[in-house]
Image (spheres, rainbow, N blue to C red):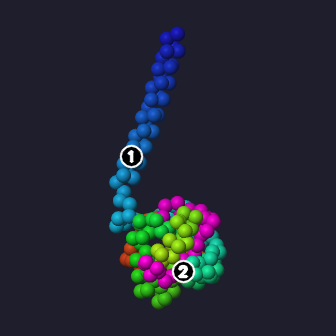
Amino acid sequence: MPKKIIGLLVLATMVVLVIIGAVKNNMAESEALDNMAIGSNVDFLPTDEGLAKGEKAPDFQLTTLDGQEVTLSDYQGQKVLLNFWATWCPPCRAEMPHMQSYFEEHAEEENVVILSVNLTTEDKGLEEIEEFVEEFGLEFAIPMDEKGDVGATYQAVSIPTSYMIDTKGRIQNKVVGPMDLPMMEKLVEAME
């Protein structure tokens, strides 16, 4: 009988220790999230999460806001800044003026295409998207991911999410969070 009690006490102690460890880990993650400033000027570092650096970027075909069909492979031989966003996203709103500035100042001379994919299934409707584009004076292509397939393929769970794709169609960087103009310049310069 005492062996059973000792065994149960040891087992109960182990269970309690596992629960305490899980709670501490969860609290640490929660605290880290609480300390993040959403929509503010935060430096995000490129990550290799999701699609691997150096791999060929998955091709896709989407229709742009102005009705043109685009495929990623159409732009092989050019650098591509592939961006995923939605109108309701504060960090996306913060990033768009920088992206438009990059487009105006560098896109042509550096052979860069911006494909800023709207996650249409996550957004509030076509009228809202058109108003957003007009508000920010966006002049680059806005492909519409109406089924959510491309966003899912590129694992655009947190937005904005951007991929830097080189002239050979290979992923060079992934950035989760808003970029500013200097960051875009630096990341594009680093590509072939």
- Is residue 128 shown above or below 18? below
Secondary structure of the residue carrying tag 2 is loop
113 relative position to 61: left or right: left
Secondary structure of the residue carrying tag 1 is helix
Whether residue 138 appears in magenta in the rendering, the answer is: yes
Q: Position of residue 92 (x, y in %)?
A: 44, 69
Q: Which residue is mark 2?
A: 141
Task: Give the residue furthest to the bottom.
Answer: 109
Task: Give the residue furthest to the top.
Answer: 1
Instruction: Give the mark count.
Output: 2
Magenta-tinted stretch: 134-160
- Is residue 182 shown above or below 159? below
Instruction: Identify the mark at residue 28; answer none if there is no mark.
Output: 1
Q: Say which label, 1 or 2, has the lower sequence index.
A: 1
**Image point 63% across, 66% down: which residue?**
147
**Image point 36% across, 52% down: which residue?**
34
Residues packed near mark 2 inside 10 Å, few (<14), some (14 to 19) or many (20 plus): some
Looking at the image, which is closer to me, 191 or 50?
50
Looking at the image, which is closer to me, 30 or 11?
30
Residues packed near mark 1 inside 10 Å, few (<14), some (14 to 19) or many (20 plus): few
